[in-house]
Image (tube, grey):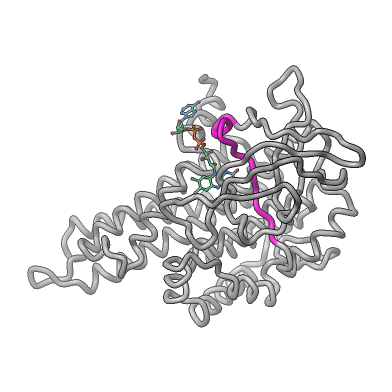
């Protein structure tokens, strides 16, 4: 199980500062632009993070990790998100769909097999839940895993599997049966991405190009029984735990990215002169920046409130939905307003606001749309 002790403020600041220094020094703006424009995964940066031990954050020390609770993980992802959102997302998948899922729900043998390699960045994990006919309605998954000999044979299709091109394993949500409730019969499998019968077709998207997203086709893919994470047919509660941690990680990374968009817009507003004065001196611009600051600050407060609640075991479904909804809507608005502050230059590929504009658009769609988060919140209020 993850370490839940709250971190020392000095440790937290040290972590933030060291990640900032690493990114600025070696993997700055030019590196991010190159990876984005050329659709290249940030492999050098990922390897360096692994070498410095960051990928072991939250991984129990007994398995070669550095330990540490959710607040530290959030701080790491916020800083990475500030520098390079796709790099933060690669790390988040390893921490959430890999390390956290296995440490919390795997057998001791699975922990011993995967966690040391995850902590050292030797393997990467991506996540396949969504299917062509099962998007917001996640319980409608059809990809079947049929018992066969000492394992399962998987057949079906997944869509939007992000980071598949850099992953060694796909945490795949399958159906091994049915039951009285729609959530019955769900089983999670860790499927090697090189399995015979598994193929991928990349999808062309508006953003998140460095890691990309793919359609996966499973045709009689055999996996041994010890690939199963959690109980057979009762994987829904496991999936819910994975998704609540996913919401925290994505929100932390996007809060960092929103801060970066704000930083760029603020610097530009102080520099750019029109009508003989910096544009930031005009209230129409300064109020935009003030609203952006407010949204970023509230996002950050929600992230660390939820991280502390997760560590204390006090998280609620409503907390997670409010976090996901607010942070993603805020990043989208901050990016849009930031682009407006830059005027015509914001619309060019020469500035990074266009990337924030594109990347932020996914937030209100992926990992549960804003409409679904509102449905969840409303349900906790006794509304249908
Ligand atoms: C770039 C990208 C990366 C992704 N990465 C991954 C990944 O790595 N792994 C993964 O498993 N999935 C991933 N996804 C999938 C993502 O989580 C889904 O797109 C999302 O859950 C929505 O599902 P859908 O696209 O099928 O939309 P649908 O569920 O068809 O929804 C379409 C619209 O209808 C609305 N809607 C649907 N039902 C309701 C309702 N009951 N009430 C109100 N409104 C409703 C939705 O809010 C939305 O606006 C990714 C998606 C994208 C675009």
Rendered view: 159 above or below 16: above
Location of residue 231 by image quarter: top right
Residue farthest along the left direction in this orientation:
275
x 59%, y 36%: residue: 131
Any part of residue 236 in sight: no
**Does the rendering let one see residue 187?**
yes
Picture layout, residue 318 above or below residue 355 = above
- Which residue ends up furthest to the top in the rendered image? 180
Above or below residue 284? Residue 122 is below
Horizontally, residue 140 falls left or right of residue 355, namely right
The answer to whether residue 113 is left or right of residue 281 is right
Residue in the image at 41% along x and 52% along y: 206
Q: At which x and y percent is residue 375?
A: 50, 28
**Which x, y percent locates residue 365?**
47, 42
Q: Report the span colored magenta.
A: 124-137
Q: Quadrant of residue 314?
A: top right
Residue 2 occupies quadrant: bottom right
x and y percentages locating residue 283 in the rendered image: 18, 58
Q: Residue sitting at 74 percent across and 49 percent down?
A: 101
Q: Nearer the viewer, residue 153 or 248?
A: 153
Residue 263 in the image, given as x and y percentages of width and height: 36, 67
Q: Give yes or no for residue 131 being in the magenta stretch.
A: yes
Nearest the camera: 283 or 97? 97
Q: Is residue 62 magenta?
A: no
Q: Residue at x 61, y 50 (%)?
A: 200
Q: Is most of the magenta stretch helix, strand or loop?
A: loop
| Relative to 286, 212 lies left or right | right
């Amino acid at each position: 199980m993850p370490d839940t002790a709250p971190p020392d403020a000095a440790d937290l600041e040290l972590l933030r500062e060291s990640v900032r220094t690493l990114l600025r020094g070696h993997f700055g703006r030019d590196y991010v632009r190159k990876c984005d424009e050329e659709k290249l995964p940030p492999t050098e940066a990922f390897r360096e993070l692994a070498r410095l031990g960051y990928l072991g954050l939250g991984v129990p020390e007994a398995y070669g990790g550095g330990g540490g609770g959710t607040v530290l993980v959030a701080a790491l992802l916020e800083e990475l998100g500030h520098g390079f959102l796709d790099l933060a997302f690669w790390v988040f998948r390893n921490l959430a769909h890999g390390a956290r899922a296995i440490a919390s729900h795997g057998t001791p043998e699975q922990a011993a097999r995967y966690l040391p390699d995850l902590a050292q960045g030797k393997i990467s994990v991506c996540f396949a839940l969504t299917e062509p006919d099962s998007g917001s309605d996640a319980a409608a998954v059809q990809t079947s895993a049929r018992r066969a000999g000492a394992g399962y044979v998987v057949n079906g299709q997944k869509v939007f599997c992000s980071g598949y091109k850099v992953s060694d394993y796909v945490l795949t949500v399958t159906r091994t049966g049915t039951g009285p409730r729609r959530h019955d019969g769900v089983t999670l499998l860790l499927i090697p991405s090189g399995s015979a019968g598994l193929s991928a077709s990349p999808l062309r998207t508006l953003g998140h190009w460095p890691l990309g997203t793919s359609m996966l086709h499973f045709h009689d893919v055999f996996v041994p029984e010890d690939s199963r994470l959690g109980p057979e047919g009762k994987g829904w509660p496991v999936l819910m735990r994975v998704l609540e941690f996913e919401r925290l990680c994505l929100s932390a990374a996007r809060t960092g990215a929103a801060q970066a968009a704000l930083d760029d817009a603020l610097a530009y507003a102080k520099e750019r002169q029109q009508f003989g004065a910096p544009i930031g001196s005009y209230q129409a611009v300064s109020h935009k920046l003030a609203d952006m600051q407010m949204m970023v600050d509230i996002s950050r407060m929600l992230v660390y409130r939820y991280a502390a609640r997760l560590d204390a075991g006090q998280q609620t479904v409503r907390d997670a939905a409010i976090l996901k909804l607010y942070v993603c809507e805020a990043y989208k608005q901050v990016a849009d307003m930031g682009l407006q502050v830059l005027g015509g230059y914001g619309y060019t590929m020469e500035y990074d606001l266009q990337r924030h504009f594109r990347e932020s658009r996914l937030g209100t769609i992926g990992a549960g749309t804003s409409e679904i988060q509102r449905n969840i919140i409303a349900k906790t209020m006794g509304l249908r």
